[in-house]
Image (cartoon, grey):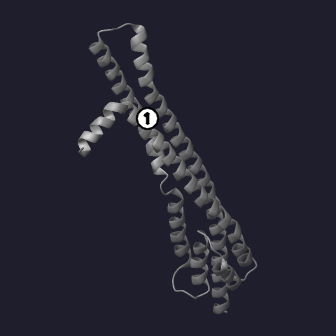
Amino acid sequence: MTLPLALEQITGDLGIELLLVLFMLGCSLFLVAIALERLFLLARVRASITTSRRVVLAARNGKLSDAAKIARSLSGPVAPIFVAGLERAVGRVRGQPVRAMMRECKRVGGAMRSRTWLLATAGALMPFVGLFGTVIGVMSAFQAIGESGQGGFAIVSVGISQALIATAVGIAVALEGVVLFNLLQSIAQRLARDLSMLVDELVELIETEEASRAASSAE
């Protein structure tokens, strides 16, 4: 049996609307998997931000070299931000500390928002996929009624009620995608705000230290 004939037999046995329902249910599981993976990454970012506060605390005590050592000992998605800035601040690496940290912040921000567009896309498209399945189901129901020669509300309502399942599933999957997208966006924005406050404080401390060095050398 060739592939086109096999697909035709499958669609004939199950119906296009049922295949669309199965497709949307598969998409629902896929969205949950994406959300769990994103939540795991965001949890790692939160833990990394918490441990990185030690770096800012050391810099606050006026010891950028100690802060750089602590930053090099850390691991996690956020650690490269502080390593990049402090390595340049203490002269181990050439470059501007502020630009280096801003560049790493953009990298972390992009990683936190990665793949969340799939959730938003599913939230926008799944109702139309469900509606398409409903239209196909209604057309099939009327075609079956025409072929059988029997009518009446009872017969029509059975076919339409079965076809409306596709729309219900599509709306449910769309709601799932929108809720998960908003949840991840809210967490990512909160983490980005906390990270920005830490980086801003470290930038202030580095600039203060550089100004103090310039004043000392001028004397």
Residue drawn at x 53%, y 51% is 33
Residue 73: x and y, percent?
66, 80
Residue drawn at x 51%, y 56% is 113
Instruction: Give whichever of 20, 127 is nearer the camera.
Output: 20
Q: Residue furthest right?
A: 61
Q: Which quadrant, please, contains the C terminus?
A: bottom right
Give left or right: position of 127 versus 87.
left
Q: Which quadrant, please, contains the N terminus?
A: top left
Residue 26: x and y, percent?
46, 43
Q: Is residue 12 above or below residue 203?
A: above
Q: Is residue 214 above or below residue 100?
A: below
Residue drawn at x 62%, y 68% is 199
Q: Residue furthest top?
A: 152
Q: Is residue 204 above or below residue 195?
A: below
**Label 1 Cα neighbours within 10 Å, binned few <14 / some 14-19 / many ≥20:** many
- The three-letter amino acid code for the residue at tag 1 is Val
Q: Residue furthest front?
A: 1
Residue 103: x and y, percent?
50, 70
Give left or right: position of 50 versus 170.
right
Name the residue beneath numbered marker 1. 21
Residue drawn at x 40%, y 12% is 155
Instruction: Give whichever of 151, 209 is nearer the camera.
Output: 151
Give left or right: position of 109 versus 137.
right
